Image (tube, rainbow, N blue to C red):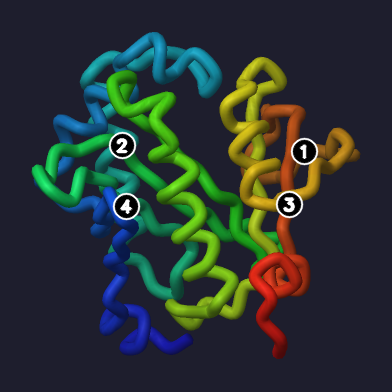
Amino acid sequence: MDTHAATAIDWRFETPRLQARLIDGRDRDLYRSLYTDGSVMAHIGAVMCEAEADVVFDKVLGYNAETPVRARYWRLSDRSTDDAIGIQSFIRPLADPASLELGMMLLPQSQGQGLGIEASQRFVDLLLGNHWGLDIETVFARHAETNARVARLGATLGFGHVDRPAQPPVERPASPPEEWRLSRQEWRALRGTAR
């Protein structure tokens, strides 16, 4: 994908209850809410102060403008009210550019309602269906062993559980131990599509 093509892409997507657009300057408070909340961060990492969350937010703005595409971050919101519910993302590992690591954080009031599954299903369909021209062969998610919700999400979406990775990736040496993967071929079989 060339630089011009990456900047011309419409990165928005929708589900029956949600809409998503790339994170932009309006979303600083959302990032602060997520990264400073102990219940959100319980399975992710240390709770941050607002200044630390702002550093993460500024990096995300840079990633969303970067070409070639290495990462993208979306604001997820309710379709009827536009109230934010969380964020969804992907990061392309340097060592394996044909795969993407998926991420999601939901505000506490948005958890346990099936919104994560709904957003992730559409997200995976767009990624493996090559909607954005990224030519991805595999998507994967990692999570802390104690995060049963992410494990259920992976299983529900048809991801296969992978035994503990032999070695953590260079980009994330403290990588969580649980991993779920779905290849484009497996996705096509699940969706009943040929190609």
Residue receiving disc 4: 74
Work out how far the residue at label 1 is from the one at label 3, CA to CA, in angstroms.
Answer: 15 Å
Residue receiving disc 1: 168
Task: Label 2, secondary structure: give it.
Answer: strand
Which mark is on residue 181?
3
Work out how far the residue at label 4 is from the one at label 1, CA to CA, in angstroms.
Answer: 26 Å
Residue 188 relative to residue 23: left or right? right
Which mark's residue is nearer the viewer, 4 or 1? Answer: 4
> Image quadrant for the C terminus?
bottom right
54 versus 41 height, above or below: below
The amino acid type found where label 2 is placed reads Gly
Labels 4 and 1: the sequence-earlier one: 4
Identify the residue at image location x=27%, y=50%: 18
Residue 137 at least partly seen? no
Residue 187 at least partly seen? yes
**Where is residue 62, by image quadrant?**
bottom left
Labels 4 and 2: the sequence-earlier one: 4
Which mark's residue is nearer the viewer, 1 or 2? Answer: 2
Q: Tell which residue pokes out farthest to the top in this image.
A: 38
The amino acid type found where label 4 is placed reads Trp
Identify the residue at image location x=80%, y=41%: 161
**Where is residue 182, by image quadrant?**
bottom right
Q: Do the residues bearing badges 2 and 3 touch, measured as CB atoms within 8 Å?
A: no
Work out how far the residue at label 1 is from the one at label 2, CA to CA, in angstroms.
Answer: 27 Å
Q: Do the residues bearing badges 1 and 3 touch, measured as CB atoms within 8 Å?
A: no
Residue receiving disc 2: 86
Work out how far the residue at label 4 is from the one at label 2, CA to CA, in angstroms.
Answer: 9 Å
Task: Label 3, secondary structure: give it.
Answer: strand
